[in-house]
Image (tube, helix red, strand yellow):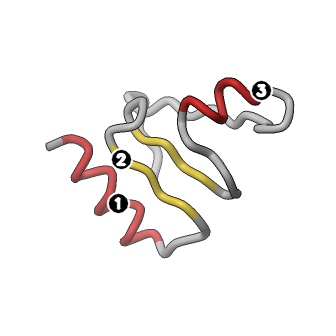
Amino acid sequence: MENPLIKAEMVEATEFPKLADRHGVHGVPHTTINDGQANVVGAVPEANLLAEIQRALG
């Protein structure tokens, strides 16, 4: 999916350990949505990721 309202960043957790700790990153992939309103750990099907995004939006 592509949307101009969505912003994504990829960070190397070992280079930014404080940021990784703040978001509870202990393994990868780890997707944090809306600054921690939802998290997805591991490679999940697109439907699971979409469900977490929708949950984070309330």
Which tag, 1 or 3, sits closer to the chain's start?
Answer: 3
Q: Which residue is mark 2?
A: 38
As drawn, which residue projects farthest toward the right?
A: 15
Q: Which residue is mark 3?
A: 16
Which tag, 2 or 3, sits closer to the chain's start?
Answer: 3
Q: Is residue 50 above or below residue 19?
A: below
Which of the pair 40/23 is nearer the observer? 23
- Residue 15's x, y, as percent? 85, 29
Looking at the rendered image, the disc whose residue lies closer to the viewer, 1 or 2, is 2
Mark 3: give few (<14), some (14-19) or many (20+) Cα within 10 Å. few
Q: Tell me the SS state at disc 2.
A: strand
User: Looking at the rendering, which quadrant does residue 19 occupy?
Assistant: top right
Q: Tell me the SS state at disc 1.
A: helix
- How far separated are the C-alphas under marks 1 and 2? 11 Å
**How many circles with numbers are drawn on the protein?**
3
> Which numbered disc covers residue 50?
1
Q: Is residue 43 above or below residue 9?
A: below
> Looking at the picture, which amino acid does disc 1 mark?
Leu
- Residue 16's x, y, as percent? 77, 26
Mark 2: give few (<14), some (14-19) or many (20+) Cα within 10 Å. some
